[in-house]
Amino acid sequence: MNRLRFDFWLFISMFLVCVLGILGIFSIIYQNQVAVYSNVLVKQILAFAIGLLVIIFYLQFNYPTLKKYALGFYIASLVLLVLVLLFGTRVRGVRSWFAFGMFSFQPSELAKLAFIMFLAKYIEEMRTWKSWRDLFWPLLLLLVPVGLILLQPDFGSTLVFFPILVVMLYVGGCRLKYILAMTGFGLLISFLTMVRIYAELKSTAVDNYVIRVIANMNYLLVFLVALFLLIALIYFLAKRLKYELSFKQMMAGFSVVTAGILSSYVFELLMKTYQKKRLVVFLDPYLDPLGAGYNIIQSKIAVGSGGWLGKGLLYGTQSRLGFLPEQHTDFIFSVLAEEFGFAGGALLLILLFIIIWRGIIIINQARDEFGALVATGIVTMFAFHIFLNIGMTLGIMPITGVPLPLVSYGGSSLIMNMFAIGILLNIRMKRFYY
Amino acid sequence: MKLIQKQTLEILALRKKKVVIVGVIIVFGFVFLFLRLFYMQVLNGRYFRRIADENRMQRFYQKAPRGQIYDRYHKLLAINIPSFVVSFTSYSLTQQEIERISRELAAILNLSFQEVKTKTFSSLQPLDPVMIASDITREQALTIMERKASLPGVNVAIEPKRQYPEGTLACHVIGYVGELTLEEYKDLRDVGYRIGDKIGKTGLEAYYDKLLKGEHGEKQIEISASGRQLRLLRETASNSGNDLELTIDAEVQRLVQDALQGVNGAAVVMNPRSGEVIALASSPGFNPNTFLRPVTRGEFQYLFKNRGRPLFNKAIQAQYPPGSGFKIVTTAAGLQEGFIIPEEKLECTGEMVLGTYNQVFRCWKKDGHGKIPLNTAIAQSCDVFFYQLGLRLGVTRIANYAKKFGLGSLTGIDLPSEKKGIVPDRDWKKRVVKEAWYDGDTLNMCIGQGYLWVTPLQMAGIFSAVANDGPYYRPKIVKKIISPDGKVYHDFFPEEQGIVELDRQNWHTIKKGLEDAVTYGTGRQAYIRGLKVAGKTGTAQNPQGIDHAWFGCLAPVDNPQVVIVVFVEHGGHGGVVAAPIARRILEGYFKKSAAEIQAVTPEEIGD
């Protein structure tokens, strides 16, 4: 019985993805006899083995027990996030690791899962959504760990919390208009910030009237123009659709837009120049060809030069000769795509897709709301990481320093992600147990 | 219980719908990544592969020595000397380091810091070497090599550099080399030329550039991102260019250039039997070594502003009316076509009145020559005699013979930018001047004036035809092309450029006339005791100023070894200005080969 409900497809895909990652790391350390890489392969294989044990171990349990520990789990992760700020090791200016001799542990990885579980528990218990005030607690649950992680400061790791929140609320029954407002707010922030920064950086390089105007525009002016346009647009649309917009609805729309514009302004003020560059450099890598653009340029060359079948394991010139930066972490997909070509890259994409696809099926198979919501959070987390990371290596997403789940080097991340897969497997296996 | 179940089912159905929407968004995301991957790897794979190769390979070029150029007796005219060049590769050096290196280099090389800095920062690709300075001194090179440790990325190499040991000697023949321009590079990059190469700009250096330049050696080294050289991927040795052995005799060339000293003009000395050019000079000349270093202001003024146009090779590019030298062509046409016989006498009264407007055409001798035969007419260069002959012949026949002698078309000498002159006729005048042909034009043409244009080298062709009794050979400057391994890559044999078919006695008549011209006629200034020279003066009328002087000759008459044509721009009368120059060349030439003359003389006596 158990054996039948064990999601073989999900497990095998996860297994193969991990193996591909290990293969990539093997290729990198084999080629670069550099001290930095010593033990990297061993540690990754060890983490993989631990991850497998965690899965096997966890399958003995019933996942609803997680509900009991969700609060404790969440609080523990917050405590660890505080502790890491005090006692963590500083690596490249970021304090996000606990180091124990040869091993290290990244509490933000744990925080993601803890957040998913506790949020799932909260949503399940809430049942009904009456007003926008119901969003207060979920938002607070998000902001505490995000704030702590931002203090490290690790901007990239916080990003995934937002789509997790939105998608889980959506699936959990939150009213669509709140979801749309939040999504719109997020997209508005990203879009406005990127356009502004791009124009600002570009204006020093080219003499283009439009770009100069955007770069030097007064924020209040932008805000007023945007507001005016929006009123006109909504009014026009509403008329066309013969739909009466209430004053409240209009005000809600405006506040989202206003908040988006103001937040992107604050964002811009807070960001340092190098962060700004990383955010927009994918639009034009030659804005900063030796700095932030370098990674993108080299990654694109690595991926593109792989061709149909790749250069062969250990023969990737971009990785072997050190042109590709951050090979074993952020840009491991580029290494694999260079050495195994489109055949390998597409295979990896397909395997990752199978994981997501099985995850989506498991959401619907879950026997209770909690299981469905946890599965939703996990699927969102995976999908978001995959899009951001692979998109970055292909030069269509900003550089955010997000690793590729199950593939990139990193013990905590690998074990946590495998644990997440274990939870999915458990949700499926225990779907008929009451 | 039932209600709860129903509610649960509704919630489940609703959730399913939402999950499908989330799923669809995710599927779109994956499809997008998939297509992007396909686009980059499959559709643009070749492009990225090339960039990846450029990334990892550093190419070093070993410049090939250019082929040498020497005269027929192997006297070197163009050689290569080793010179030190400094280049810089920035690798992963920081900005501050590059600035420090630039400052140190500037101090060693006596250049301004700014100048060096512009160059060191000019390479966008950190692995492309940029040239900092060429032709630095040995001491500077040694200093740089000693301080190698503090000058990372700086490389001193020895490269062959062109030099012309004889300076101005045969400058117009040899030409000079210069930096490849960007336009030239665009045209030539597919045949192995690279930025920074030298390319022949004029003369033989330009004409035979592809044979002279050789092939660059290349080293492809695989490097890491930090610029460490890892392994040799490919290495090809450089191949020197081919050597040129010229038909030029450096001593005669020197003699000719000395004879032309101080005038604006040109001279050609050619072997009529083969077309070998023994000397070819244009005056004033220039020193080709000037172009191998930065040209000074004074030099620039001289090269480009001087009215004598030093860079212009007048021997093949100056086009002027030939003057009386053309009477050879008129004579040839008249005799062969039967419009005159040697015995017929025509009267010269000093002028000829033509047509309804009573236009007067004068002889150069005001009083006239009286009744004279053809021989005297040639020797004295009587214009009125030839006016009458010209009218009998008509323009078409004269033009046809001019073309038979090679006028109006390129001789095909192996030098660039040769001009072909003009042989006018009725069609030509209608087409170009847009006027009908008048008899007056015929009169002008038959004595070598008017619209007729020739180059000195074409005139040499006319005298060659006379010397050979008909055939004349394409002028050649290069005798042999010798490959680097010493084998003769190409050997030039005499090539007939054309043939003027006249009866033997007609050639004899012409030659006798020309000989008399030198012995007692207009060309007396070229007379040399003991050497039978047949020559003809010429004076090209110049309505704008002083006339241009010509003299052409062949010697010795009975066994012609050499044809000489001298042209002096704005020189005045040919017999006065050009003939003495020709005599100096003849004297020098035959003194040199006096032994050969003596060897021939006994036979002549017996003849």
Image (cartoon, coloured by chain):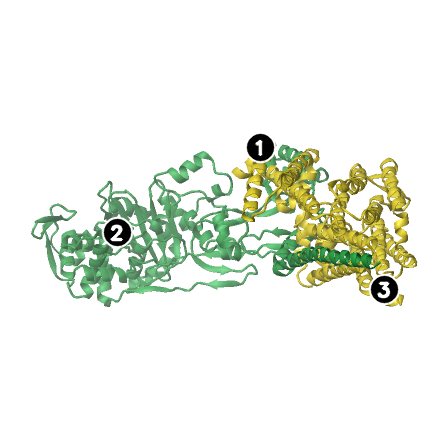
Chain colours: A yellow, B green
Name the chain under label 1: A
Q: Position of residue A267 (x, y in %)?
A: 69, 36
Mark 2 neighbour class, 10 Å CA radius: few under 14, some 14 to 19, many 20 or more: many
Tag in front: 3 or 2 = 3
Tag 1 residue: A221
Which of these two is toward me, A128 or A205? A128
Tag 3 residue: A6
Q: Position of residue A151 (x, y in %)?
A: 79, 36
Name the chain under label 2: B
Q: Quadrant of residue B241?
A: bottom right
Mark 1 on the same chain as mark 2? no
Which of these two is toward me, A187 or B525? A187
Answer with left or right where residue B320 lies relative to residue B339.
right
Answer with left or right where residue B47 lies relative to residue A86.
left
Answer with left or right where residue B168 lies relative to residue B239.
left
Numbered circle sitting on residue B75: none
Q: Amino acid at mark 3?
A: Phe
Q: Position of residue A256 (x, y in %)?
A: 66, 39
Tag in front: 1 or 2 = 1
Q: What secondary structure is marked by label 3?
A: loop
Distance of label 1 from label 3 (alpha carbons): 58 Å
Q: Amino acid at mark 2?
A: Pro
